[in-house]
Image: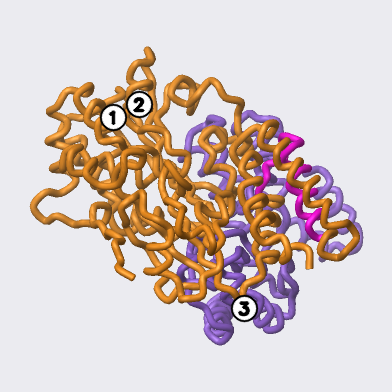
Amino acid sequence: MENNLKKVDIIFEVDEKVTPIDVLDKTLKRAADEIILDLIDSGLKGRGGAGFPTGLKWKFTRNEDSDVKYVICNADEGEPGTFKDREILDRVPEKIFTGIAICGYVVGAKEGYIYLRGEYNFLLKTLQRKLDIFNSQLKERNFDFTVYLKSGSGAYVCGEESALFESMEGKRGEPRNKPPYPTVAGYNSKPTVINNVETLVYTTMICHMGPEKFKALGTNDSRGSKVFSVSGDTPKPGIYELELGMPLHEFVNEFGDGDAKAIQVGGASGHCVPRKKFNDTIIGFEGIPTGGSMMIFNSSRSMYNVLHDYLEFFTEESCGQCTPCRVGCQQLLKGIEAVKRGERPPAYLEDLKKLTATMKIAAKCGLGQSVGNPFNSIVDNFREEIIY
Amino acid sequence: MSRIVNQFTSHTQFTNHKQYFIKLKLEDYMSTTEVLVKELVEKNGRTRNSLMPVLQGIVQQEHYLSEEAMLFVAKELDLAAADVYGTASFYTFLDTVPRGKNIIRVCKTITCHMKGKDEIVNVLSNALKIKVGETTHDKKFTLLTANCLGWCHKGPVMLINDEVYPDLTPQKALEIVEEYAKTTH
């Protein structure tokens, strides 16, 4: 079969002639509103998974009337199967710093933060050294903005933006009720832009190459490209920047081992797509969105084990403050174990699906709300494997 | 803290010699932790927002957060001790029970699971003669499992303290840990 998968090189591209600081210089000469219009025009949506339009996020924060505002780079990459942010932080950190500084200029912030997950502490020293250089470059330009580095301590839920603020404020990483949204009251209850690592690099690159080039990639609903983290049963695991809106079967042709029976799109909290649906599944905001995690399972894998692994993960990582998530995760895990052992009839799976519906409505944050994604997609498509 | 002090004073009633020894040790211990907390608070600022960096700094030095350390932090940052403990106990990397000088965390999430993390855990468990969650008698190692460490394309993977070791085989994992055993005193 012909392969149409389009590989792109924007994020990791190193241009000797135009460095990130050159992009910053060029951008700081432009009006903030113009930059926002470019971002909105580019169609860039958040690359962490939720997909909120980046230009709007910046605009809302800019419009807030406050002396103190913050820009935060969410580098708490904890979704199972995702490792692209680590690679970006390692290879092109200056592009991230530049994105943060541009955002600071646009919204009128004086402080930027990178919240790095504790599991990536080995990156701290190098990042801090490069950050010191970057901060001194800002000073030379009389641009009143400083980027600081903060470290997490091993909590998946802190990737949720409001939990991340709580953690930065020295509290338990428990998500807040929304609204107010971060653009109104984020870190220290001040207007805050919080963007994923990859999103910030794309903002730098859109400022560099203009929105047209970015817009030309992808589809109407999913503009641009995206960095994918490919793992599982594949002969070539790793990181690939691909155009959004690709049909899943093309992805499988390229990365599968010839025996792929299911792809988990979007990590543990994402959706499981079985082989029979490869042909009519689009990877993008119009189909199945993803923060980049693509885990491939071949026919040697038990989907019961996969689901069990995910549920164990959520049970441990649920922050525990709201009952639907805390108890829900536990009961889903116990439930599939009971069905497997024959202590509960197969129809019990329907009750468990109702529980995920309740969690989706009643859980406070994305963690509890999305447990139903893997649960329902695996139970519906691989029912026999769960029961027998 | 008072509980610990009582514990020590009751020991000191046995012999004069022992009393001298324990007193000296207790004071040494208190002072280093207190000095460390003061230094960290000085460096990060006397606000609630500094709590995480301060706690992280203590764990870096002492491998866990002792009751004393948390009480000192509460005093220095003017917080309720329960607030400090509440925050600390939320985070996997902020241990409130004693840990070894080297903390091994083997990733157990799906891809590493598929690539053989069980064998890694077993071989380390046998070599160190401890189960997951335990610390060796010589206090050199604690063996733990962790949720996704972000190396799914290079599993199985483990962290030892802050260092990462991807693409593991049981043999490779053993050699790495043996190297740590040699250099840890």
Tell me if A280 is positioned left or right of A351 in this view. left
Instruction: Report the mark closest to the observer, 3 or 1.
Output: 1
Q: Residue at x 67, y 61 (%)?
A: A382
What percent of the width, then of the height, locates residue B61? 56, 57
Residue type pointed to by label 3: Ile
Question: Looking at the colours in the rendered structure, which chain would you say is drawn in orange?
Answer: A
The magenta span reads: A317-337
Label 1 packing within 10 angstroms: few (<14), some (14-19), many (20+) = some
Depth check: B66 or A34 in front? A34
Q: Residue at x 25, y 31 (%)?
A: A41
Q: Which residue is mark 3?
A: B120
The residues bearing labels 3 and 1 have C-alpha atoms spaced at a distance of 48 Å
**Residue with the most extreme top position:** A65
Question: Looking at the colours in the rendered structure, which chain would you say is drawn in purple?
Answer: B
Q: Which residue is mark 1?
A: A40
- Dot label at residue A56: 2
